[in-house]
């Protein structure tokens, strides 16, 4: 039998695994719709400085007399306040578009940094084993034993408000999830035959980890990243709602919701309602797309 006869059959979609994942992902209309909504929100956030009717943080464009106008009112530089205004006369549509920018930056930025750091810790623990593995995993277990909001509050209380401090708090909250997942996946891969073959070729352990083990760990890490992005956005919104998140000069969706809580009983619900809807839609889109991505990367988890 020739080597060609022993080669495994190719996938009907060719050699690219991305096409197979996309085919499984796109089989769900809900997942495709969620991904489209997420990309639409990301695009709107990126284009906010150009498509927003008003710069809600430019004091020269605000008029206190336009404060708390209901949706559909006319006036000011925005022309028509389609979603109304808040107590400072800011156009709610413009504020939501700019708030989306900060929420996405905090959520995605914390996931990238925490994912990179946690993956490095997990791979190191799996490769080193012994006391190094035990020490790193006990540190991760210690972090996971505390509620996420408590750790974030402690960091903010010590460092103060601000986007950079919120990012740091979220990174400290999230890294352990990636570390545990990376270690579990790496332990399985390190026992594989291709790793043994690479070691027989006396390849450096660093190269084995980065070139061979890490790519096979990425699917599970990508799924965790989708859930952690939504979780980070929700945690940042909670901190900002409590007045402990980003500064008032760069409000996120959580801070916009908090601005209207004093006017809910007086019937001016739109100040908190529309930012809340935007936050809910954003998180739902990420979670629904992430759930389907998990099933596409590991069909055994699907229904």
Image (cartoon, rainbow, N blue to C red):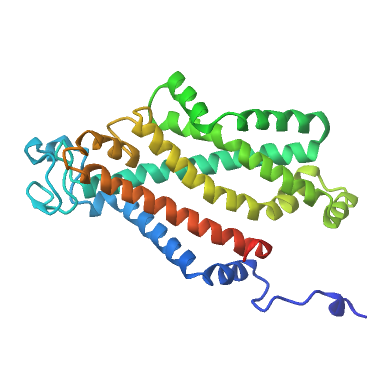
Residue 272 placement, left or right of 194: left
**In which quadrant of the rendered image does the N terminus lie?**
bottom right
Q: Residue most toward the top?
A: 158
Q: Residue at x 63, y 64 (%)?
A: 302
Give the total number of marks visible in the rendering.
0
Q: Is residue 96 above or below residue 114?
A: below
Q: Residue at x 43, y 42 (%)?
A: 233
- Residue 220 is situated, as x and y percent measured from the top left of the image, at 64, 52
Seen at 16% across and 48% down, the residue is: 84
Quarter of the figure with residue 69: top left
Is 21 left, or right, of 288 in this rendering? right
In the foreground, 292 or 267: 267
Residue shown at 38% from the left, 26% from the top:
161
Residue 147 on image: x %, y % = 54, 31
Q: Who is closer to the viewer here, 251 or 2?
A: 251
Residue at the outermost right position: 1
């Amino acid at each position: 039998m020739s080597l060609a006869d022993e080669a495994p059959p190719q996938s009907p979609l060719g050699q690219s695994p991305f096409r197979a994942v996309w085919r499984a992902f796109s089989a769900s209309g809900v997942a495709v719709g969620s991904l489209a909504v997420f990309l639409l929100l990301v695009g709107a956030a990126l284009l906010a400085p150009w498509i927003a009717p008003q710069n809600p943080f430019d004091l020269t464009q605000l008029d206190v007399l336009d404060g708390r106008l209901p949706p559909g009112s006319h006036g000011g530089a925005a022309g028509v306040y389609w979603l109304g205004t808040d107590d400072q006369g800011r156009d709610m549509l413009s504020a939501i578009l700019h708030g989306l920018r900060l929420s996405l930056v905090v959520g995605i930025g914390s996931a990238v940094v925490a994912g990179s750091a946690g993956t490095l810790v997990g791979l190191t623990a799996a490769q080193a084993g012994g006391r190094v593995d035990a020490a790193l995993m006990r540190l991760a277990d210690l972090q996971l034993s505390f509620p996420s909001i408590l750790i974030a509050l402690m960091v903010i209380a010590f460092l103060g408000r601000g986007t950079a401090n919120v990012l740091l708090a979220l990174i400290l909250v999230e890294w352990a999830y990636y570390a545990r997942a990376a270690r579990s996946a790496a332990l399985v891969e390190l026992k594989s035959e291709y790793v043994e073959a690479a070691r027989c070729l006396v390849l450096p352990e660093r190269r084995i980890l980065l070139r061979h083990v890490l790519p096979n760990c990425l699917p599970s890490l990508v799924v965790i990243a989708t859930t952690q992005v939504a979780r980070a956005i929700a945690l940042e919104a909670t901190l900002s709602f409590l007045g402990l998140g980003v500064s008032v000069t760069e409000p996120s969706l959580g801070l916009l919701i908090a601005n209207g809580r004093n006017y809910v009983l007086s019937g001016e619900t739109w100040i908190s309602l529309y930012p809340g809807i935007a936050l809910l839609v954003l998180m739902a889109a990420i979670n629904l797309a992430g759930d389907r991505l998990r099933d596409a990367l590991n069909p055994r988890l699907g229904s």
